[in-house]
Amino acid sequence: MFSTNKAGSQADKQVDKESFLLRRMMDGCQRRAKILAVTSGKGGVGKTNISANLSICLAASQKKVLLLDADMSLGNLDVIMDINSKYNISHMINGHKSIEEIVHITPGGLGVICGASGLEGLANVGEFQRQRLLKELSCLQDDNDMIVIDTAAGISKSVVGFCLASDHVLVVTTPDATAMTDAYAMIKVLAGNKFAGHISVTVNMARTIAEGKKTYQQIANVAKRFLGVDVYDAGTLLRDERLNNAVRMRKPVVLAYPKAQITSSLVALAAKLNNGCAANTSEDGFFKKVVDWFF
């Protein structure tokens, strides 16, 4: 299902990079990517791990996928995916690098943009810089089939902005009562801001499938009753020590343990989200909505 070899040679990486740029030129900016934001009200629920592994699964299904680390203070996708990238999104925001120069292409063809502090600085850029930034970022949406946004935890302005601009928000929780409360708080904020896309919940680290379903149902019932919002069941991921082992190995679990049950569950989750994520038909692109949110 997935290659278990260590990251390819520099030559392989160069081929991947060239293929990415060639596809970009051939595509001619004719499509608009679906945007999936992966978020959580509470930290420590496995959100970033799920973002990384979902993106790998989507890319393995012949999708052109970009994974953006939108945690601009504590981003750690580079650690989980063992990426040693010189550049991140702050270099583009500051005008030092172009989109092509900050996208890291993995051996599997997944594009990754690492996070860094600095996104809040968007509010201080001039109009010329803002337009240049929008032009650069907009090509990302035009050049990919799907963009997965790994947000920070919590309900800060930047997290809410990324979620509201997305087509589909995946809220990650665990059966823990505080995680459920914080997941509901995120759904409540989205509802309060009249989010027009789909909201799904995945329950991570459940002891049993039944526990996961019960956790989802409790959140969905309260959201429907008090917010009038439909929340969809994205599935349950069982607690698995191999996930922790993979983190210590600095390797996504779907690559470290391709035949494990957790990998099969993540593949199923990716398929469900891909089928349920429709691109927004609004004329305003995702990144325009995000940048506008900061002004």
Image (cartoon, rainbow, N blue to C red):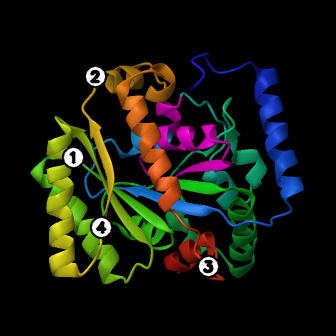
Which sits in the foreground, 194 or 133?
194
Q: Within 10 Å of the Cα at label 4, are there few (<14), some (14-19), or many (20+) other Cα atoms?
A: many
Give the residues in magenta.
Answer: 53-81
Q: Residue at x 62, y 79 (%)?
A: 281
Q: Within 10 Å of the Cα at label 2, are there few (<14), some (14-19), or many (20+) other Cα atoms?
A: few
Which sits in the foreground, 82 or 34?
34
Kindly identify which residue carries mark 1.
174
Kindly identify which residue carries mark 2.
241
Q: Within 10 Å of the Cα at label 1, are there few (<14), some (14-19), or many (20+) other Cα atoms?
A: many
- 54 in the magenta segment: yes
Kindly identify which residue carries mark 3.
281
First reached walking from the N terminus: tag 4 or tag 1: 1
Mark 3: amino acid: Thr
Mark 4: amino acid: Val
Q: Quadrant of residue 227?
A: bottom left
Q: Can the viewer see residue 194 in this picture?
A: yes
Kindly identify which residue carries mark 4.
231
- Label 4 and label 2: CA atoms lie apart by 29 Å
In-image side of 117 versus 89 (left or right): left
Q: Can the viewer see residue 179 in this picture?
A: no
First reached walking from the N terminus: tag 2 or tag 1: 1
First reached walking from the N terminus: tag 4 or tag 2: 4
User: Where in the figure is residue 223, as x and y percent of width and height?
Assistant: 21, 72
- Disc 4 is placed on an element classified as loop
In-image side of 9 versus 176 (left or right): right
